[in-house]
Image: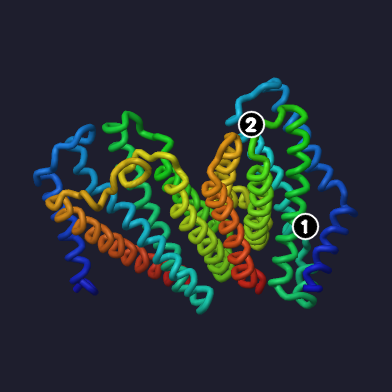
Amino acid sequence: MKEIIELIRKDFRLEVRQRYALNAILLYVVSTVFVVQLLFGHIIDDATWIALFWIILLFAAFNAVSKSFVQEHNARWLYYFMLASPVSIVLSKIVYNSLLMIFLGFLSLALYIVFFGFPFHNTLLFYSAFILGCMGLASALTLVSAIASSAGNNTVLMAILGFPIVIPLLLLVIKAFVMALQVTISPQDIIKILVSLFLIVAIIVILAVILFPYLWRK
Amino acid sequence: MIKGWLWKISGLLLVFYSIIAGLLIHVPELPVVHQTIRNLFFHVPMWFAMFFMFGTSLVYSIRYLGSMKLKDDLVASQSVSTGLLFGVLGLLTGMIWAKFTWGDFWTNDPQLTGASVSVIAYVAYLILREAIDENALRAKISAVYNIFAFMLLAIFLGILPRLADSSLHPGKGESPSPMGDLDPMMSLVFFPAAIGWILFAYWVLDIRKRKRIIEMQHQL
């Protein structure tokens, strides 16, 4: 547990020190939202709102998460190998990336609300699905980035491997968002979709923890 | 002699039987589908064969992570290729059927989404394999990806139809269940067809596996 917290702190410090990476993603989010605003104008229909929002967030996630394993050099890997267990390394990366994604997500959401308004009625469902979606994206892409980095740090590979993995999650989140548009939804439906979202995130994390040690041993 | 000839020949005979009987038997007159219902004997067994192939590949990927024997990896990768062949055939037969009953080659249907995402995921698996040169490393990384992708796709395919409001496929949404009211005459052809195509897929896998082993021996 202490190991995990220490590793998260290390990632956080690295991020603060190399601010260019975070700033680049922030600029990416701002400029895409701005481009969308220029192209679509102010009023867009709800389906477009949701679709564009998740496309922006998806690419931000690919940019943000892909460097989590790629940025580490081989020599540093050896160093971590001697210091920490693979399970705590992958867990720390998942937690760190989830926090980063939630931060980026809320930032893009704020920008998005400023430009395009907020059409959702059920805010509780919206925010829970939103946070679960960010966590799921971050954890799925963490393992994919580990796979891509062991296959020779290929960024194209990251995109190819990542898309089929995140499509199920993305469809579920978008389904939840569409539900949140309605004024009245039955509580069972809300529970059903949130439980399926939670389960899919939990399974991604469990699989990552089981599978990562195999990638680790080289 | 052919090794394990009994199941191979019976698979082949079942496929021939399903093609001949499938085109000849009397099928119930249903609105919209009419005679295209016969495609059920070809379209659905393709998906069965594909899932059996991907399932085999999952089993061998898990075995590889336990045993680290390259032969397990070889079976895993060859069953993915074979499964993809059946997946593409399933998509094609489905598209032809859809054109004649629903009016379009492609519709926004949860079954179609699930099928295409699975096919994309396994094409990504093959691309991942090509990106790595070293045998042992390639086997290990692709096994990890295979397990991860299969588990997520399995959940996805389980959840997806229940989340969808409606589907054009029978048994989902408002349409009636497919197996419950399958015509007794048709089920006499359908189940042999499914078993036949699955056995046929394993035969294809067997040949591909042996071919690959010979190729590898020549390289060494």
Location of residue B60 in the rendering, given as x and y in whole percent from the top left corner: 44, 70
**Circles 1 and 2: CB distance less than 8 Å?**
no
For this orientation, the residue located farthest to the right is: A17
Residue at 78% over, 48% down: A103
Which quadrant: the N terminus of chain B? Answer: bottom left
Give the vertical position of B200 relative to A179 (above or below).
Answer: below
Q: Name the foreground residue: B207 vs A156.
A: A156
Under circle 1, the secondary element is: loop
Q: Chain of mark 1?
A: A
- Label 2 marks which chain's residue? A
Query: What's under tag 1, amino acid-wise?
Result: Gln
* Image spot of residue A76 (x, y percent): 80, 68
**Residue nearest the viewer, comparing A121 with B204:** A121
* Residue under numbered circle 2: A49
SS for callout 2: helix
- Determine the residue positioned at 60% across, 56% down: A198
User: Mark 1 or mark 2, which is nearer to you?
Assistant: 2
Task: Please tell me whether residue B155 is drawn above or below residue A77 in the rendered image.
Answer: above
Disc 2 residue type (three-letter): Trp
Is A101 positioned to the left or the right of B207 in the image? Answer: right
Q: Would residue A62 be seen by someone viewing this image from the given angle? A: no
Give the mark nearest the N terminus, 1 or 2: 2
Identity of the residue drawn at 74% across and 38% down: A109
Dot label at residue A71: 1
Q: Position of residue B137 (x, y in %)?
A: 59, 68
Q: Nearer the viewer, residue A7 or B11?
A: A7
